[in-house]
Amino acid sequence: MREQSKPPTLKSMAAELGIHVSTLSRVLNGDATAVMKAASPDVVARIRQLAAERNYRPNLQATALRTQRSQEIGVLMPRISDLVMATLYEGIDAAADSAGYMSFVSNTLDDTDRQLALGERALRRQAAGLIVADSHLGGREQLLQLLSARKVPYVLISRRQPGHLSVTCDDYLGGRLAAEHLYRLGCRNVAVLAGETFASTGADRARGFVAFFQEQGIDIPASHILHGHFDSREGHAQGQRLLEQDRSVEGIFAVNDFLAIGLMGAIRQAGAQSGKDIAVVGFNDTPLAAELPIPLSSVRLPLHEMGEMAFAALLARINGEEVESVLIEPQLLVRESSVLFEPR
């Protein structure tokens, strides 16, 4: 019988190339920063070509055990089915892949106990760091305490938390942009679908919206500030409830596009028209916004880029670098859902 060839090792490939084994190890098992420090581009290319020819696959588990850090990062999100979350994750994953890392995502369902359990699982996998998209305002989250205590690098994305590194939008400004737009259209009786109370995104957007109208001498009644889930079903239900109690409302701001889409359905069901009878503004400018039968005015965020920025911040932390939170300025895109409004 023919003797099967032995699988390649770092030692055998190093001897074949005449390169020290530690150089091969850093190139084939290290992250992008380690690779750049390990060897010249020409040497890196030679190493990777030989590894491909020999079908060499690094033992990532062994590397993690040896270094106490893997080339994986964990991402915790409320629901990956949410288009906003999915787009953020695409940005994270693309940036991680470019840097030689692999990402994995877990759905926490916006439950803090589940968040902690999934975070602990990620740590048992010796993840190099975590990106957290489901942070809750109020109280002290156990997961963030755990990560801080164990000195595990982490970054918050989308939702902020005072005292923690984050990549977020200036949500307060975004709410003000929506309010200023509706006010200039002539809307005085307004409402806001404000999302979950524990999410900084909804809270800050609603706060900015309400504050602008207060500065104009208009107090938005509590009955016109509705809280609930961030989805179209909730938007429809809240729209129905709002219109049943006040058919004279002129402008409504929804703190995300899915709430706005459900709201527009409720407006249509009530025999009115979004844009003409009631001005509607959403938030995030998801791809659906511009393609609706009545295109939706929305506050735009560079979601994919935010994901990339979050990974860059995490990688800097992993490498022991100082890094500051990123606050992104939003932009209002006006479409037919508000521009056709006719003041009563």
Image (cartoon, rainbow, N blue to C red):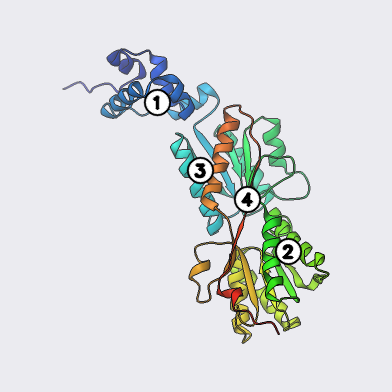
Element type where label 4 sits in the image: loop
For the C terminus, the image quarter is bottom right
Mark 2 vs 3, N-terminal side:
3
- Foreground disc of the pair 3, 4: 4
Mark 1 vs 4, N-terminal side:
1
Q: What's under tag 2, amino acid-wise?
A: Phe
Q: Which mark is residue 158?
A: 4
Label 3 – label 4 distance at C-alpha: 18 Å
Neighbours of disc 1 within 10 Å: few (<14), some (14-19), many (20+): many
Q: Which residue is mark 2?
A: 209
Residue 41 locus on image (x, y percent): 36, 24
Residue at image x 38%, y 15%?
21
Mark 1 vs 3, N-terminal side:
1
Label 1 – label 4 distance at C-alpha: 33 Å
Residue 45's place in the image compared with 271, above or below, is above
Left or right relative to 4: residue 150? right
